[in-house]
Image (spheres, helix red, strand yellow):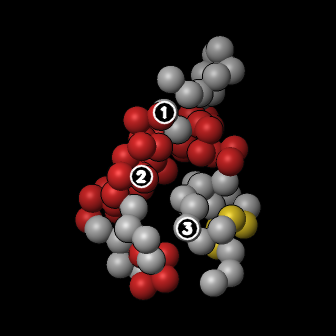
Amino acid sequence: MGAHLCHAWGCQTEINPHLFMCLKHWKMLPRFLQKEIWHHYRPGQEEDKQPSQEYREVARVCKEVISIREVLPDPEGEYNE
């Protein structure tokens, strides 16, 4: 299966299908959200397009967090907690 785009709104970076976001946006997520994405990820969901409701909800929160952090960057320049 070929690459797809990062799930951050407006990002045009191509990434491997099993990944959620490009490295830039992934590093902007708090670690607890990174862990939640992987916790709810089911191998093969990128192929059958059937992620769980829990995965979809965490993905929505992650996209919102990134959109806020891109507008209001962390004053310390570090995003991971």
Relative depth, front residue between 47 and 66: 47
Question: For numbered disc 2, what is the local secondary structure?
Answer: helix
Quadrant in which the N terminus appears:
bottom right
Spatial separation of the CA atoms under disc 1 and disc 2 = 11 Å
Which residue is found at the position 65% from the left and 14% from the top? 76
Q: Is residue 12 visible?
A: no
At label 1, which amino acid type do we have?
Answer: Pro
Residue where numbered disc 3 is placed: 18
Percent across and percent down for residue 15 are 68, 65
Residue reaching furthest right?
A: 13
Mark 2 neighbour density, 10 Å: few (under 14) some (14–19) many (20 or more): many
Label disc, if present, on residue 37 of the rendered structure: 2
Residue 44 placement: quadrant: bottom left
User: Measured from the top left, where is residue 55 in percent x and y?
Assistant: 34, 60
The residue under the point 48% across, 50% down is: 63
Residue of label 1: 30
Is residue 65 toward the left or the right of residue 55 in the image?
Answer: right
- Asked where in the image residue 60 lies, by quadrant, the reply is bottom left
